[in-house]
Image (cartoon, rainbow, N blue to C red):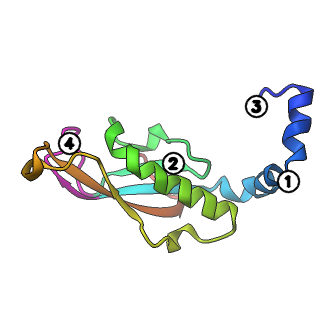
């Protein structure tokens, strides 16, 4: 991470950091997936079945995603990515999350917008995931 010796000492002094680092190896094979489950009038042309992939540390894996990803759709979805990330760090299955859907903030044509998509969260193993 480019820490100085003093910064590394500060990092290591925080017990939460040590806990997260100890779980990092197990999380490297996990993928947080946001799947489009509803789509109508989406300006980015996202369709049902499109998937946005994040690693277990919250990084968007662009090589696995559609060529363009609507940044507006990620606004509320990132809260789910954060929640899944925290659940994994806590040793809780993130697929048990109760509220696993979020939508882009566009309200849709009937309410004065253009369109909207709804994303559903799931966590999968990276093995077998094909670029989308």
In this view of the protein, which residue sits in the foreground, 23 or 132?
A: 23
Look at mark 1 in the image and give the residue it sits on: 15
Taking the spot 51% from the left edge, 48% from the top edge, the residue there is 54
Q: Which of marks 1 and 2 is in front?
A: 1
Farthest residue to the front: give it. Answer: 111
Of labels 4 and 3, earlier in sequence is 3
Of labels 1 and 2, earlier in sequence is 1
Tell me where the magenta segment starts and ends, as one range.
37-48
Q: CA gap, disc 1 to disc 3?
A: 18 Å
Look at mark 4 in the image and give the residue it sits on: 45
Residue 112 at x, y percent in the picture: 10, 45
Dot 1 falls on a residue whose secondary structure is helix
Q: CA gap, disc 1 to disc 2?
A: 25 Å
Which quadrant of the figure has residue 33? bottom left
**Residue 14 seen by the camera:** yes
Mark number displayed over residue 1: 3
Could you tell me which quadrant the N terminus lies in?
top right
Q: CA gap, disc 2 to disc 4?
A: 20 Å
Of labels 2 and 4, earlier in sequence is 4
Look at mark 2 in the image and give the residue it sits on: 54
Is residue 34 within the magenta segment?
no
Q: CA gap, disc 4 to disc 1?
A: 44 Å
Dot 3 falls on a residue whose secondary structure is loop
């Amino acid at each position: 991470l480019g820490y100085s010796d003093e910064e590394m000492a500060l990092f290591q002094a925080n017990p939460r950091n040590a806990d997260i680092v100890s779980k990092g190896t197990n999380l490297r094979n996990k993928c947080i997936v946001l799947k489009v489950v509803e789509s109508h009038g989406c300006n980015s042309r996202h369709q049902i079945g499109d998937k946005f992939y994040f690693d277990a540390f919250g990084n968007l894996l662009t090589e696995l995603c559609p060529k363009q990803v609507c940044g507006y759709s990620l606004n509320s979805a990132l809260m789910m990515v954060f929640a899944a990330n925290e659940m994994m760090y806590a040793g809780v299955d993130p697929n048990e999350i109760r509220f696993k859907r979020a939508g882009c903030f566009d309200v849709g044509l009937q309410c004065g917008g253009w369109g909207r998509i709804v994303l559903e969260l799931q966590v999968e193993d990276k093995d077998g995931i094909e670029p989308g």
